[in-house]
Amino acid sequence: MSSDYESDWVQYISAEGQLTTDGRKAWEQLSDQLKIQFYRWMTFVRLFDRKMIVLQRQGRMGTYAPLEGQEAAQVGSALALTDQDWVFPTYREHGVALTIGFPLTHVLLYWAGRVEGCKPVSNLRYLPPAVPIATQIPHAVGAAWAAKLKKEQTVAVAYFGDGATSEGDFHEGCNFAGVFQLPVILFCQNNGYAISVPFSRQSAAKTVAERALAYRFPGIRVDGNDVLAVYMVTSQAVKRAREGQGPTLIEAVTYRKGPHTTADDPSRYRPREEVKHWSRQFDPLTRYQLLLKNFQLLTDSEEEAWELECKRRIEQAIKEMESLTSPPPTHLFAHVFSDLPPALHKQRLQVKQKEGKEHD
């Protein structure tokens, strides 16, 4: 990615952990409690992410979609929402899910291939992860339209990657949101690659944010590795939506350190120096830790204690998940069709008969 990829964005925290002029104004508006929350959630999400990769490599988890490097984009945006808002995630928004209160065991169950991981939580408007690219965008726009018709103060947020902006669902969602001026936030985490395809091969436009101009609503480009900037930009978009001023497209420019999934090898298409550059200059957690320490809001001992607590909670959730009774093999055929097609009905019967023989 070229140097201009890192310009023309909203940035409040420098790579050295220093506040910009606008960043200082934003910083002064926030409570110390919220400032610590940013750090705690980003740390928790990173340690969870690293543990999940270990579990997958050990054969205790299925294919997993890592997110290290995108913690600020997910935590910063999630903390700007309330439990009355609708969230439409992709398969990589574990950080968003955990930050808004989705149970850790549910996230683990999802990646273990258990249907329980997709079950909604009664007090959260968090939809199951969308694996097909961009299909959740029209869903979020529909939820926003319903909220507007019902005169609710509800905002819908659709999360997606840069690859989704090449899909028709993205443009259809933008068009509908713009025409009806709906309370929806389209939150793109632009990692620079749609698996192996660089953004320059997806679009002649240099940014995602500029596409909002065609649909007559604001497009904002933010340093997605700057948790303070992401939080403030998202908060402003939420405020606009609640006040009936319509949608916002947010392009959070970020960089995922790891592969697209644990089945991917990014060294085949990403230069090693590029990865080093982003890890060295824009790591979201490192720069925020520096900022907190500059303001005497975090000590080395507090940092160590919180990391130990995070690891304890994660290990406890893993034990709970792995202690659950495994579902029967016939569960593979559930929750897909109301009436199984003949071929699947036959397969289900064969599985059930085999299972019965094994228990004789």
Image (tube, helix red, strand yellow):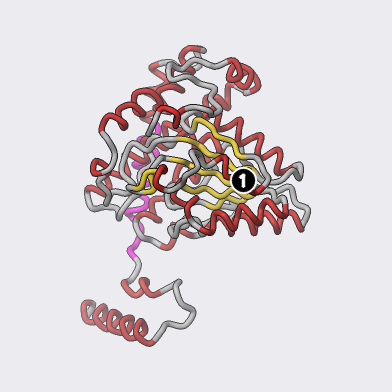
Element class at badge 1: strand
Q: Main secondary structure of the magenta part?
A: helix
Quadrant in the picture for the C terminus: bottom left
Q: In the rendered view, would you say 360 is above or below 214?
A: below
Residue 315 part of the magenta segment? yes
Q: Say which of 202 and 349 sits in front.
A: 202
Q: In the rendered view, would you say 211 is above or below 321?
A: above
Disc 1 residue type?
Answer: Ile
Q: Which residues are magenta?
A: 309-326
Residue at 55% from the left image edge and 52% from the top image edge:
88
**Disc 1: which residue:** 185
User: Quick check: 101 left or right of 55?
Assistant: right
Residue at 34% from the left image edge and 41% from the top image edge:
315
Q: Position of residue 167 (x, y in %)?
A: 49, 56
User: Quick check: 246 left or right of 45?
Assistant: right
Quadrant in the picture for the N terminus: top left
User: Quick check: 59 left or right of 66?
Assistant: left
Q: In the rendered view, would you say 264 is above or below 281?
A: below
Q: Residues within 10 Å of mark 1 (few under 14, many from 20)?
A: many
Q: Say which of 178 and 59 sits in front.
A: 178
Q: In the rendered view, would you say 77 is above or below 18?
A: below
Residue at 28% from the left image edge and 79% from the top image edge:
351
Q: Which residue is situated farthest in the right direction here? A: 151
Q: Position of residue 333 (x, y in %)?
A: 38, 75
Q: Say which of 164 and 80 sits in front.
A: 164
Residue 323, quarter of picture: bottom left
Q: For residue 200, say whether it is visible.
A: yes
Q: For residue 306, say whether it is visible.
A: no
